[in-house]
Amino acid sequence: MVLLLLVAIAVGSTVEAIRLDARDASFARGKKSATEKLRDSYLAQARAQRRRGSRTRFDSLEAIRKAAAIQPSSNCDEAIASLALTDVRLTHTAG
């Protein structure tokens, strides 16, 4: 009787461990997908700001910085294109 109880506990805990592992893997895939979508949206924002024209360099580079914080690679082309823009930002005023 005790042996049967031990076998039932062992089988039940193994099945539960496998189920929890599958759920954790599914959660990790969903989180990765959401993070990739956020990075892609930052890159799309940088691209749109760059195409808009003048006075967008700093905003575009800021969006690229946010995308690079998520995944450092694959942002070089956008960064180089944004650096080619002209932009002026007032840092302080005299007086």
Image: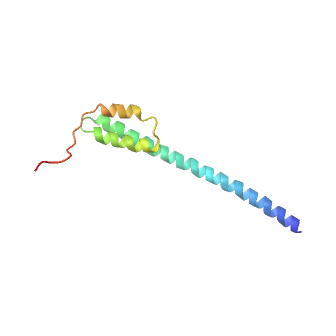
Residue 43 in the image: above or below residue 27 = above
Image location of residue 50, percent across then percent down: 31, 35
Q: How is the image coloured?
A: rainbow
Quadrant assignment, res 64: top left
Give me the residue at 69% from left, 55% from top: 19
**Left or right: where 7 falls relative to 72:** right
Give me the residue at 18% from left, 48% from top: 92
Give me the residue at 32% from left, 34% from top: 82
**Left or right: where 13 falls relative to 54:** right
Image location of residue 9, percent across then percent down: 79, 63
Residue 82 in the image: above or below residue 15 = above
Image location of residue 56, percent across then percent down: 27, 39
Q: Is residue 89 visible?
A: yes
Toward the right, the furthest residue is: 1
**Left or right: where 27 falls relative to 67:** right
Quadrant assignment, res 66: top left
Total labels drawn:
0
Q: Is residue 41 visible?
A: no
Toward the bottom, the furthest residue is: 1
Quadrant assignment, res 39: top left
Image location of residue 47, percent across then percent down: 36, 36
Toward the left, the furthest residue is: 95
Toward the front, the furthest residue is: 95
**Left or right: where 43 falls relative to 10:** left
The quarter of the image holding the N terminus is bottom right
